[in-house]
C-alpha cells in the first residue's frame, strides 16, 4: 500500500503523551490530563486567531460586534481560556501568565501539583498584519503539598518537566518537549487532533541565519555588536549569514529550530535585562533548544540555570544552533577576561 495517500499510523499528541506516561508506571496520568487541557486551550486559540482576520473584515472587531457585545482583545480572550482550562484540569496550583500582574493560586479542591507559566498569545501585536503568533508554556512540579507560595514557581528553567509552544500561522503547529527530545504536531482541523508531523526535531549543529532586531544596534554592548559584525563580515572568509527577523518570538524560534542559526534578544543600554521574560519566553524556548541539541545563553550563564526573583523578570537571551551560541559565549568570556 506504499501509494496510499493517507497514513494510517496516526500518532496524535494524546497518544504520544500516553506513550510517554507509560514509561512512568508510578504516574497516575495527572500530567496527561494537564497536557490535554493545554492542548484544548491551543485548539480554541487557533480557532479564534484564524477568525480574527475575518472578524476584522466583516466589522466584528473593534469595540463591539454586531450583537453589540464587547469584542475582547484576542490576547485577553486567550488568557481567560487558558486560565479556565488549567484551573478546571484540577492538576495545577500556581499559574503565571504574561497577561496577569499577579500569579493565580488555585484553591482546593481543584488544586493539583503542577505550576504552569505561559504567554497566552505572544507577539499579539502582529495579529492585524497576519504574522504568525503563538502560545508559549512551561510546566514545573511543585515540590510538596504545603500551602503554595510564589517562591514555588521561582525555579530555574532546568527544573521544568515540560515546555512547548503552539504557533498560529499557515498551519497550527504545537512543538513540545517532556524532557526526552522535541516533537512537532500539526492540527488537522478535520479531525480536531494534533498529528505528529515533526518527530524527534534536532537543530542543525551550526546555522547560516542570525535573527536580531538590528534597529537596537546603537545600544548593544561590545560582544553582541562584535558577534553581529562577524555575521555580516566574517573574518575567516566564510560566507556572510542571512538575517531573518519576524519580530514574533514563536515564529523566529520555530524557524531557528527547524533551519538552524541563532536568535538573539540582547541587553542594551535602554533595557539592561533585554526584553524577553524569563519564566514564559526565555525558559521554555531554552528548554526546547537544549532538548533539540542546541543551547541557550544569557550573556552571563546558561539560560536554564538562571533563578528568577520576580515572575515577570526579563533576561537577555542568545539561543539556537550549538556552535553559533558557542561563538557568542566566547566573545562574552573574552570581555569578562579583560575586566
Ligand atoms: P522587538 C513580541 O512583542 C515579542 O514579545 C516577541 O514575540 C518578539 O520576539 C519580541 O517581542 C520583538 O521585540 O523589540 O524586536 O519588536
Image (tube, rainbow, N blue to C red):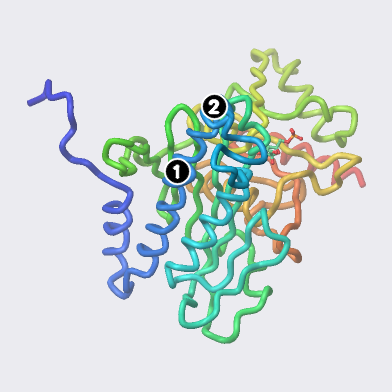
Q: Quadrant of the N terminus?
A: top left
- 10 Å crowding of disc 1: few (<14), some (14-19), many (20+): many
- Which SS class for mark 1? strand
Check the image and name the residue furthest to the left.
1
Q: Position of residue 190 (x, y in %)?
A: 28, 36
Q: Which mark is residue 300?
A: none
Is 85 left, or right, of 324 in this rendering? left
Q: 149 or 258: nearer the eye? A: 149
In the figure, 300 relative to 161: above or below?
Answer: above
Label 2 neighbourhood size at 10 Å, few (<14), some (14-19), many (20+)?
few
Question: What SS does tag 2 mark?
Answer: loop
Residue 175, label in figure: 1
Res 94 quadrant in image? bottom right
Residue 118 at x, y = what percent?
58, 55
Which of discs 1 and 2 lies nearer the camera? The answer is: 2
Q: Which residue occupies 12% across, 24% down?
A: 4
Across and down, in percent, residue 249 comes to 63, 37
Q: Is residue 48 above or below residue 308?
A: above
Residue 133: quarter of image: top right
What residue is pinned by disc 2?
58
Q: Residue at x 46, y 40 (%)?
A: 46
Q: Residue at x 33, y 56 (%)?
A: 17
x, y percent for residue 221: 87, 36
Pick the front one: 303 or 105: 105
How far is disc 1 from disc 2 in space, using C-alphas? 32 Å
Tell me if residue 149 comes above or below residue 208 in the rendering.
Answer: below
Q: Earlier in the sequence, mark 1 or mark 2?
A: 2
Front residue (pair 291, 177)? 177
Ligand 1 placement by image quarter: top right
Amino acid at each position: 500500500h506504499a501509494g496510499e495517500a493517507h497514513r494510517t499510523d496516526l500518532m496524535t499528541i494524546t497518544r504520544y503523551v500516553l506513550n510517554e506516561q507509560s514509561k512512568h508506571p508510578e504516574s497516575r496520568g495527572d500530567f496527561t490530563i494537564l497536557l490535554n487541557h493545554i492542548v484544548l486551550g491551543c485548539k480554541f486559540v487557533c480557532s479564534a486567531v484564524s477568525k480574527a482576520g475575518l472578524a476584522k473584515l466583516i466589522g466584528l472587531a473593534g469595540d463591539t460586534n454586531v450583537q453589540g457585545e464587547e469584542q475582547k482583545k484576542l490576547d485577553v480572550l486567550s488568557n481567560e481560556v487558558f486560565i479556565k482550562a488549567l484551573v478546571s484540569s484540577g492538576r495545577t496550583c500556581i499559574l503565571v501568565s504574561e497577561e496577569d500582574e499577579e500569579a493565580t493560586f488555585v484553591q482546593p479542591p481543584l488544586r493539583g501539583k503542577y505550576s504552569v507559566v505561559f504567554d497566552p498569545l505572544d507577539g499579539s501585536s502582529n495579529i492585524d498584519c497576519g504574522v504568525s503568533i503563538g502560545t508559549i508554556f512551561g510546566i514545573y512540579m511543585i515540590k510538596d503539598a504545603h500551602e503554595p507560595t510564589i517562591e514555588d514557581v521561582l525555579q530555574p528553567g532546568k527544573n521544568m518537566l515540560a515546555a512547548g509552544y503552539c504557533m498560529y500561522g499557515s498551519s497550527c503547529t504545537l512543538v513540545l518537549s517532556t524532557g526526552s527530545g522535541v516533537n512537532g504536531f500539526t492540527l488537522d482541523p478535520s479531525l480536531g487532533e494534533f498529528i505528529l508531523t515533526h518527530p524527534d526535531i534536532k537543530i542543525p549543529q551550526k546555522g547560516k541565519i542570525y535573527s536580531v532586531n538590528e534597529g537596537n544596534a546603537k545600544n548593544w554592548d561590545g560582544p553582541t555588536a562584535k558577534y553581529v559584525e562577524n555575521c555580516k563580515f566574517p573574518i575567516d572568509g566564510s560566507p556572510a549569514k542571512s538575517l531573518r527577523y519576524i519580530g514574533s518570538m514563536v515564529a523566529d524560534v520555530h524557524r531557528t529550530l527547524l533551519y538552524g542559526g541563532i536568535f538573539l534578544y540582547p541587553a542594551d543600554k535602554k533595557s539592561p535585562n533585554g526584553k524577553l521574560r524569563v519564566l514564559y519566553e526565555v525558559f521554555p524556548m531554552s528548554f526546547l533548544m537544549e532538548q533539540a541539541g542546541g543551547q541557550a545563553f544569557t550573556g552571563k550563564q546558561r539560560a536554564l540555570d538562571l533563578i528568577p526573583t520576580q515572575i515577570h523578570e526579563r533576561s537577555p537571551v542568545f539561543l539556537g544552533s550549538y556552535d553559533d551560541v558557542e561563538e557568542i559565549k566566547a566573545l562574552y568570556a573574552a570581555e569578562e577576561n579583560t575586566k
